[in-house]
Image (cartoon, grey):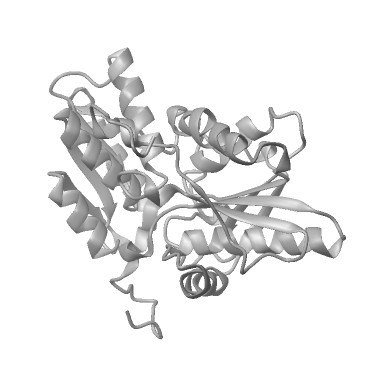
């Protein structure tokens, strides 16, 4: 796939590699990260953005002259922006004004128009503002609504889950993904649960309502996405902000992987699970999602006091 000749950047999505985290592994347990930042837009969000656009073009919801508008904390917005540019679509993004400068700059570089919501309202505030804008002139917009669109988890059912099974097959015992829109976790879990071997599927969420794990949702204090189906999961694992940040630093220092803090939280969750398996004297294989690269977090946010990049 990586050496293929393709007709459009849309065809470059998927078939991302797994990398083994040997420095983290307890005896008898393999830990892998699926490097979703190797998608063309640099994140796992390329998959659902592409699927939502293609499905809407196919059934006519996204027609000529319509503006694609959605709320985003950044990565889905980057994906909408690059695919919009490739397809000649006008894109408007609603995001909290305190998202990282890198994400603002990247989306603008593709020609997207940015609309900022109150930073104190977080991603929920951006959702509400996007819905208000669409309600004022619904015929003008295609509103994918990534939090409610079944094409979001479908992208991971068709792609991420199937790829993981092809890569590790029957060795897989545990899967870990963070909760944001919940699409990655839900779609991949649904596919893995169809496999003949039982696979323990775990959702990572921030341990605190006020947290520093950008892109992840503390479900108990947030608008719960309609696509979220907690009954599919075997476990929900709370991860503290500090643990996600420390793991991001550890992956950079020990594995040469410069990843974002949601990825750090996922890898921390994978380590917790691996240590449980090892403590029972069993063998296991844990796969976690690497959502994006760390370079999108170079600009510190207000809560970052002791990190100087």
Q: Quadrant of residue 79?
A: top left
Q: Could you tell me residue 11's position as x and y percent?
A: 32, 30
Residue at (63% x, 60% y) in the render: 269
Dividing the picture into quadrants, the one containing residue 5 is: top left
Q: At which x and y percent is residue 36?
A: 44, 48
* Residue 80, above or below 126: above
- Location of residue 91 by image quarter: top left
Asked if 240 appears above or below 152 in the picture, the reply is below
In the orientation shown, which residue stands out farthest toward the front? 3
Q: Is residue 28 left or right of residue 233?
A: right
Taking depth in this image into account, of 6 and 242 the one nearest to the observer is 6
**Residue 249 seen from this side:** yes
Q: Position of residue 233 (x, y in %)?
A: 68, 42
Q: Is residue 144 left or right of residue 235?
A: left
Number of numbered tags placed on the structure image: 0
Q: Is residue 288 left or right of residue 215?
A: right
Up-down relation of residue 222 to residue 146 (above or below): below
Name the one closer to the observer, 157 or 128: 157
The residue sitting at 20% across, 49% down in the picture is 107
């Amino acid at each position: 796939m990586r050496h293929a000749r393709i007709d459009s950047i849309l065809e470059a999505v998927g078939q991302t590699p797994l990398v083994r985290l040997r420095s983290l592994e307890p005896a008898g347990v393999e830990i892998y990260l699926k490097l979703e930042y190797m998608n063309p837009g640099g994140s796992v969000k390329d998959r659902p953005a592409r699927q939502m656009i293609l499905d809407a073009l196919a059934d006519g919801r996204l027609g000529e002259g319509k503006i694609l508008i959605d709320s985003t904390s950044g990565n889905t917005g980057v994906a909408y922006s690059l695919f919009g540019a490739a397809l000649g679509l006008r894109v408007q993004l609603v995001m909290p004004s305190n998202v990282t400068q890198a994400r603002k700059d990247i989306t603008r570089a593709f020609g997207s128009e940015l609309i900022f919501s109150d930073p104190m309202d977080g991603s929920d505030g951006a959702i509400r503002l996007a819905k208000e804008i669409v309600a004022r002139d619904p015929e003008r917009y295609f509103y994918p609504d990534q939090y409610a669109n079944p094409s979001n988890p479908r992208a991971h059912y068709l792609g991420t889950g199937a790829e993981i099974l092809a890569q590790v097959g029957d060795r897989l015992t545990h899967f870990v993904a963070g909760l944001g829109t919940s699409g990655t976790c839900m779609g991949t879990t649904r596919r893995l649960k169809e496999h003949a071997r039982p696979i323990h599927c775990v959702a990572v969420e921030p341990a605190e309502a006020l947290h520093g794990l950008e892109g992840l949702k503390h479900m108990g204090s947030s608008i719960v996405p309609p696509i979220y189906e907690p009954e599919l999961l075997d476990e929900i694992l709370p991860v503290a902000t500090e643990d996600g940040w420390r793991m991001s630093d550890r992956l950079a220092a020990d594995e040469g992987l410069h990843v974002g803090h949601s990825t750090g939280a996922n890898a921390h969750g994978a380590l917790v699970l691996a240590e449980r398996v090892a403590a029972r004297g069993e063998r296991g294989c844990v796969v976690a999602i690497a959502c994006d690269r760390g370079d999108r977090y170079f600009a510190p946010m207000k809560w970052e006091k002791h990190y100087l990049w």
